[in-house]
Amino acid sequence: MTPTENPDAIHIVFDFGVVLFTWKPVELVAEYFPQRAASVADAGHLAHAIFGHADWQAFDRGVMPMLAVVERTSLRLQLDQQVLHELVASVGARLLPVPQSLALLEQLRDLRERTDGKIRLYYLSNMPIPYARALQGRYPFLDWFDGGIFSGDVKHIKPELAIYQLLASRYRLVAGRTVFIDDMLGNVAVARTQGWHGIHFRSAQQVRQDLYHMGLKEIGLQPPPDRRR
């Protein structure tokens, strides 16, 4: 249960892949296709050919089922279809919480409770429907969020403007009081065009520092530890 809506609340929006959950596509393709991904460079090229293609974006968008993506990708890249299916089907189970990011999310949740809802927590994630349902079924901490959008559920993906606008209208986000956290700089740039504050994720410690200096220290967010000591 979340606090009553506070009109002065700061809205913090999390991406999921890399930010809150591990996402390691290069390691994934190297594991399943070692001959095609014999070097880090080769693995990177193959990962981009699979996950950066329009077919995968259609999967993200919720308009192409997993089996179709596997069939089309295996034909396009001359990959073993059964092996590729095993890879794609395994992704949901491989999205694991990033401990430092989860600790930050927990602190923000506790801060929300202590401050009568002066912050609100949301997510905006490019996530195919099977993986979204897997995460929701596996991780109760997703209930800490006040709301959010998975791309597969709404047929829009980042960095398209429509998905940002949908999140803002659905949860009545106030542009100047919304902070968006994403590992993709292009996604952050679009958020900034909407008047949102953008944080380009590099580490949970860096995000905590940025939030602290954005004013959350005024409501009790603790700064990250000084690792130079």
Image (cartoon, grey):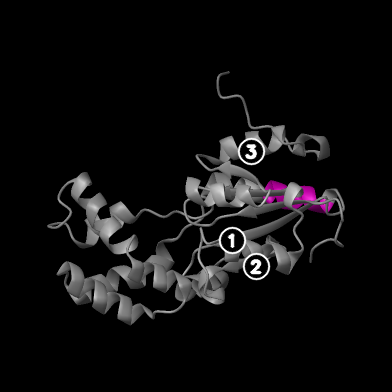
Highlighted range, magenta: 106-113
Confirm whether residue 184 shows in the render.
Answer: no
Q: How much space separates mark 3 and mark 2, taking CA atoms?
A: 26 Å
Q: Which mark is residue 208?
A: 3
Is the C-beta separation of discs 3 and 2 under 8 Å?
no
Please give left or right for residue 56 compared with residue 168 in the image: left
Count every numbered label the image shows and give the total: 3
Q: Which of 74 and 203 is in front in this view?
A: 74
Q: In which quarter of the image is the N terminus?
A: bottom right
> At x 72% / y 66%, what residue is drawn?
169
Q: Residue 112 carries which label?
A: none
Residue ID for mark 1: 124
Q: What residue type is labelled 3?
A: Arg
Confirm whether residue 41 shows in the render.
Answer: yes
Image depth: mark 3 or mark 1 in front: 1
Image depth: mark 1 or mark 2 in front: 2
Q: Which amino acid does label 2 sit on?
A: Leu
**Image coords of residue 9 (percent x, y):** 81, 51
Q: Which mark is residue 166?
A: 2
**Image coords of residue 44 (percent x, y):** 26, 50
Q: How much space separates mark 1 and mark 2, taking CA atoms?
A: 10 Å
Q: Which of 153 and 118 is in front in this view?
A: 153
Q: Earlier in the sequence, mark 1 or mark 2?
A: 1
Q: How much space separates mark 3 and mark 1, taking CA atoms?
A: 19 Å
> At x 68% / y 61%, what residue is drawn?
145
Is residue 151 covered in magenta? Answer: no
> At x 67% / y 59%, what residue is drawn?
122
Q: Which of marks 3 and 1 is nearer the N terminus?
A: 1
